[in-house]
Amino acid sequence: MIEIREVSENDLNSLSDFLSFQPPFSHTTKDIWMRRFNTWWVTNPANNSQFPMGWVLVEREKILGFLGNVPLKFLIYGEDKNAAAAVAWYVDPTARGIYSLRLLNEFLKQDNVSLFLFNTDSEELMRLLYKFGFKEYILPKFKKIYCLVLEKRKLLFLLKELSVIKRIHNFTSFVTMLISTQKFLKELLFQNFTNFLDSFQSEEYTSSLCSSCDDSYSNLWVVSNHQCDIKMMRNIGTLNWIYFSSINPSERIVIQCRRTRDDSLAGYAVFDILRQKPSDTAVMKLMDMCIEDYNFDALTSLLEVALNIAKKNRVPLLELWARDEKTEEFLKTHFPISKPAQHHNFIKFSDAVQQRSIPPVICPSIIDPPRGIDHF
C-alpha cells in the first residue's frame, strides 16, 4: 500500500539515492542532493521546526515520490509573512495520478503559510497549477535576454544556445533558419563591447567581487523596490543565504559597485556560470541586479568586471536582462544580439490573506527560490 508522510532526517540518505537516479535529474549525484538538502533546510534562515521538509510517497519503505518544501519570508503589504516554495516534485511513473496530486495537496494544506511559490516551464504542469488557483508571473519583465559573445570561435554552440539553429520541418523552416543565421552573423559583426565600456569609463565607481552582504545591500533593495506590495524579504540573512550559502564560488559570482569617494554601495549584480555537465561549454547568466537610480555608470562598472570574469573562465556567452524600462532601453541600444526568454513563476495566496480591492503590485525575481538555491 502506498502511503504519504512528511520527510524525516532518516529519509535523506535514501531520498538522495532515489532522486539522483530519476530521468529529470540525470545530471545530478547523491552528493549534489545532500548539498541541496543542506541549503534548503539547514542554512535557510527562514526554516524552523514548524515547516515540513517535504513529503514522500512510500511503499514498504521504498520511496516512490517526493515534493520538497522550502520556507521563505515575504513582505505582504509591509507585513512579514511566511511563504513556501515547492521544489523537486517527482513521482515514479508507477505511482502517478492521484498520488502526485496528494503531494501537491499536502504542500497547499500548510496553515502557517500565506504565499505558495512554484517555478516551472513545463506546459503540462502549468495547466495543473492554473487549476489549483496559481497565478503566473513571467520573468524577465520584458521577456528578452541580451547577449554578449566573448568567443566567436564557438559559433556552433552560439547558434544553438541562441536558438538560431532549430529543427527543420520543411523548406520554409530551412529558409527561416538561414535568414536567422544571416541576421545573427551581422549582429555579431557589429558587436563592439570594448569600445562601449571605454565610452562609459568613470573614476567615480569601482567594482569588485564580494563574499558577503551587509545592511547596505538590503537597504539598496528596499529603496529600489519601494513600489512593490509583495516581494521576498531581502534582509542580510536571506541575501547571504541565496548568494553564498553552500555555493561553489566558481558557479555563483557576486559583484559589488562602490563609490570611490566614500566606498558607499551604488549597486550589485549576481551571475551564475552554468553548464549541464562539467565538460560542457558554459554560459554566464545574470540572476539578480540592484542598482541605485538607473545609474548606468555603475551598471557599466559592474559589467566590466563580469566581462573579465567570463573571459577568465573561458565563457563564450554573457546574458543580461532588464528590471525596468530605462535599463531595457539601455541594453537594447548597446547590445545588438538578443533572444526571447520566459521564466514562469507561479504564486498562490492562502485563504487567510486579506485581498484588497486594488490588485497588489507583486515583484517576483528570477533569483527567488527555488531558482536562487537550486542551481547546482
Image (cartoon, helix red, strand yellow):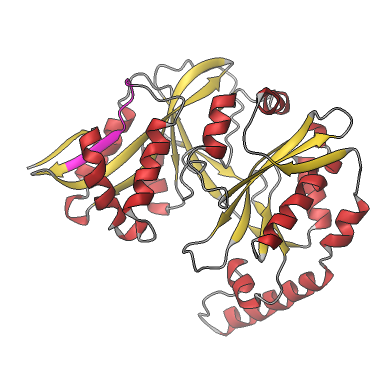
Q: Position of residue 164 (x, y in %)?
A: 62, 72
Q: Residue at x 71, y 38 (%)?
A: 268
Q: Residue furthest bottom?
A: 171
> In the displayed structure, does residue 304 sit left or right of residue 33?
right
Residue 332 magenta: no
> In the displayed structure, does residue 156 sit left or right of residue 264?
left
Quadrant showing the N terminus: top left
Is residue 222 or residue 180 the one in the foreground? 222
Is residue 234 or residue 350 the one in the foreground? 234
Is residue 240 or residue 131 the one in the foreground? 240
In this rendering, the answer to whether 240 lies above or below 96 is above
Question: Quarter-wise, where is residue 29 in the image?
Answer: bottom left
Residues in magenta, as a range: 49-57
Q: Residue at x 67, y 23 (%)?
A: 215
In this rendering, the answer to whether 219 lies above or below 35 is above
> In the displayed structure, does residue 135 sit left or right of residue 55?
right
Q: Position of residue 80 (x, y in %)?
A: 52, 16
Question: Quarter-wise, where is residue 203 in the image?
Answer: top right
Say if residue 109 shows up in the picture: yes
In this rendering, the answer to whether 356 lies above or below 147 is above
Q: Residue at x 39, y 20 (%)?
A: 351
Is residue 31 or residue 143 the one in the foreground? 31
Q: Position of residue 6 (x, y in %)?
A: 23, 32
> In the displayed structure, does residue 245 sit left or right of residue 193?
left
Question: Quarter-wise, where is residue 112 in the image?
Answer: top left
Q: Residue at x 90, y 49 (%)?
A: 200
Q: Position of residue 191 (x, y in %)?
A: 81, 66
Say if residue 232 shows up in the picture: no
